[in-house]
Image: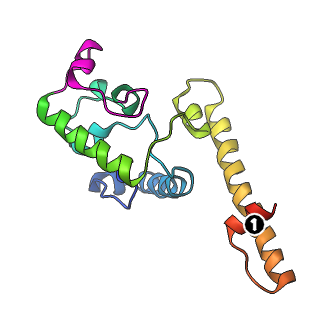
């Protein structure tokens, strides 16, 4: 399962053969479309470039480790001083991917609420995740119901941007 590209991306066929994995992928695509407008820093650009069976999962490098405080990409020498070894070809691929992602989508500077839950190793993680997703769903339904009521009362539809500006 891949996060990259933010568009409808290709997944490996073995992932969709299992009905639970396929359902998880479907739910993830919906969450990603609604909640991740930009690219999170926990994403590993190498996962999108390398076939998963070849990649060593212990050596995945995340955008958080690759980016400078100003938002640019660290040089190879800066990464070496941190103890991160990347070949020149992999670094060129990461540079290209970073440039494309930055222009097309942008990056979140901080972790989102769902990111904090997923990255934490706390107890009751499933409960917290369920409550977070339920809150997202309720926000959407509340807005939709209010906008439907507006359309019935006023005789015309209202865009979400207009709704937020008015209220």
Q: Nearer the viewer, residue 95 or 36?
A: 95
Side of 161 relative to 88 (left or right) = right
Which residue is most to the front?
A: 70
Side of 59 relative to 3 (left or right) = left
The location of residue 117, given as percent across then percent down, is 59, 33
Circle 1 Cα neighbour tier, 10 Å, few/some/many (<14 / 14–19 / ≥20): few
Q: Nearer the viewer, residue 83 or 28?
A: 83
Q: Nearer the viewer, residue 128 or 13?
A: 128
Q: Which residue is painted at 44% across and 35% down in the image?
A: 41
The reply to whether residue 33 is visible in this rendering is yes
Q: Quadrant of residue 7?
A: bottom left
Image position of 100 with respect to 142: above or below: above
Side of 87 relative to 116 (left or right) = left
The reply to whether residue 2 is visible in this rendering is no
Which type of secondary structure does the marked residue at label 1 adopt? Answer: helix
The location of residue 24, given as percent across then percent down, is 48, 52
Q: Which residue is painted at 23% across and 16% down in the image?
A: 80
The secondary structure that dominates the magenta segment is: loop
Q: Is residue 42 magenta?
A: no
Image position of 130 with respect to 11: above or below: above
Q: Which residue is mark 1?
A: 163
The location of residue 112, given as percent across then percent down, is 58, 38
Q: Nearer the viewer, residue 112 or 25?
A: 112
Magenta-highlighted residues:
67-86
Q: Which residue is painted at 56% across and 57% down in the image?
A: 34
- Locate the C terminus by quadrant: bottom right
Q: Is residue 71 magenta?
A: yes
The colour scheme applied to this rendered structure is: rainbow
The location of residue 8, given as percent across then percent down, is 37, 61
């Amino acid at each position: 399962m891949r996060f990259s590209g933010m568009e409808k991306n290709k997944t490996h066929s073995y992932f969709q053969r299992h009905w639970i994995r396929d359902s998880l992928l479907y739910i993830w695509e919906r969450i990603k479309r609604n909640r991740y407008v930009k690219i999170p820093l926990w994403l590993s650009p190498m996962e999108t470039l390398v076939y998963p069976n070849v990649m060593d999962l212990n050596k995945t490098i995340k955008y958080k480790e690759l980016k400078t405080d100003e938002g640019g990409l660290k040089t190879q020498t800066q990464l070496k001083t941190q103890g991160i070894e990347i070949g020149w070809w992999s670094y060129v691929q990461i540079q290209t991917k970073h440039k494309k992602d930055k222009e097309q989508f942008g990056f979140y500077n901080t972790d989102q609420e769902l990111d904090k839950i997923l990255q934490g190793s706390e107890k009751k993680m499933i409960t917290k995740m369920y409550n977070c997703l339920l809150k997202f769903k309720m926000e959407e339904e509340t807005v939709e119901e209010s906008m439907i009521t507006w359309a019935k009362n006023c005789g015309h539809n209202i865009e979400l941007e207009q709704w937020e500006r008015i209220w």
